[in-house]
Image: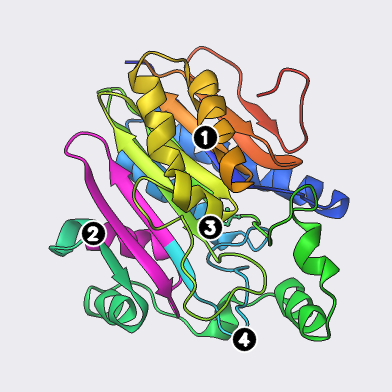
């Protein structure tokens, strides 16, 4: 099968002064992960590796660089899924871990569960040797400043990221989908969640079917956008089902995004179908994204293109 990889760094109203950092961050991760896939890295390892790199890049709202919640804490959500046996793992509202996506993978491989949350998730991470850290190791100046501005009452900062719609602030979530030589599909997603979120708020990213889905027989998808909307239309699964019924990835993605109209949502998706065709689609003002398929040229962009990719 042809190799394919698509990554995203969040669908939202990426500000002009963050365009270049978003583009460069996606390009670096796409190139590095693609090189490793060409050397034989399986799809599941590839999506974890890509998301770990994005979690390390403070440009993005995942891992280091994650948002503070309303109580000045960094609670993160992440998930991973493989499409052969439909195995999945996820963590929600987890604190003090360097790579939430790797804890999600540990949940998939070393527990009898799919989703662990809060204190229990962190304890599980510690018991299984995941890299722990302090909140201040994850916190970057940009996020502290944003937090303080929102606390001072600057509501427009909450709206900035998503001005086109009425709802809160999706931002800079990261994700990846991949197909390897054996035709195996995998997906991963990781986020610090939305600006000014309540303590304990969990978005779509760790919810299988909403923020992520992978099925070798149909396709794989990782979502980003307003989580409260994505959850209610089960966005990633809707897109994968569309690919399963024969729609190309971009058309399946767009049809799934159209279902958000009922909840006045907005989002973006990266997708790969079972033939290894890949796409990135979004209905937010911008989305940081990168797509590469074997035999084609890598595509990286943040702004909307006439081609609509
Ligand atoms: N979907 C994420 C959430 O609601 C945010 C994002 O994608 O930017 O937590």
Q: Which residue is mark 1?
A: 270
- State the mark number for residue 238: none
Of residues 83 and 166, which is closer to you in this image?
166
Mark 3 to mark 1: distance in Å?
A: 19 Å
Mark 1 to mark 4: distance in Å?
A: 31 Å
- State the mark number for residue 228: 3
- State the mark number for residue 114: 2
Disc nearest the viewer among 3 and 1? 3
Mark 4 to mark 2: distance in Å?
A: 28 Å
* Residue 147, picture quadrant: bottom right
Q: Which span of residues is magenta-colored?
A: 78-107
- Please give the name of the residue rendered at 77% of the width and 85% of the height, measured from the top-left corner: 151
Q: What x and y, as percent, mark residue 191? A: 52, 60
- Please give the name of the residue rendered at 74% of the width and 41% of the height, measured from the top-left corner: 286
- State the mark number for residue 72: 4
Of residues 257 and 33, which is closer to you in this image?
257
Ligand 1 closer than 8 Å to the CB at disc 2? no
Ligand 1 closer than 8 Å to the CB at disc 3? yes
| 1 or 4: tag closer to the N-terminus | 4
| Above or below, comparing residue 3 to residue 210 in the picture | above
């Amino acid at each position: 099968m042809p190799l394919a990889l698509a990554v995203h760094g969040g669908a939202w109203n990426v500000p002009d002064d963050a365009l270049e950092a978003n583009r460069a961050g996606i390009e670096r991760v796409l190139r590095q992960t693609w090189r490793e896939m060409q050397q034989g890295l399986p799809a599941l390892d590839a999506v974890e590796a890509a998301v770990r790199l994005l979690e390390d890049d403070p440009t993005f709202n995942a891992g280091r660089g994650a948002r503070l919640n309303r109580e000045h804490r960094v609670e993160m959500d992440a998930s991973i899924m493989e499409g052969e046996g439909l195995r999945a793992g996820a963590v929600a509202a987890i604190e003090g871990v360097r790579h939430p996506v790797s804890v999600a993978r540990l949940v998939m491989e070393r527990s009898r569960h799919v989703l662990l949350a809060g204190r229990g998730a962190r304890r599980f991470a510690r018991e299984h040797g995941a890299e722990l850290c302090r909140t201040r190791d994850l916190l970057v100046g940009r996020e502290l400043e944003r937090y303080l501005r929102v606390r001072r009452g600057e509501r427009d900062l909450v709206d900035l990221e998503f001005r086109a719609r009425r709802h809160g602030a999706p931002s800079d979530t990261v994700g990846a989908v991949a197909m390897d030589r054996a035709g195996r599909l995998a997906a991963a997603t990781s986020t610090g969640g939305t600006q000014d979120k309540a303590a304990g708020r969990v978005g779509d990213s760790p919810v299988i079917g909403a923020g992520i889905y992978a099925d070798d027989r149909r396709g794989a998808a990782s979502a980003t956008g307003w989580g409260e909307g994505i959850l209610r239309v089960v966005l990633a699964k809707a897109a994968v089902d569309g690919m399963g019924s024969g729609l190309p990835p971009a058309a399946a993605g767009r049809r799934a995004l159209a279902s958000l109209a009922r909840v006045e949502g907005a989002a973006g998706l990266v997708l790969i179908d079972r033939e290894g065709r890949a796409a990135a689609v979004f209905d937010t003002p911008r989305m940081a994204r990168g797509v590469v398929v074997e035999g084609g040229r890598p595509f990286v962009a943040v702004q909307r293109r006439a081609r609509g990719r």
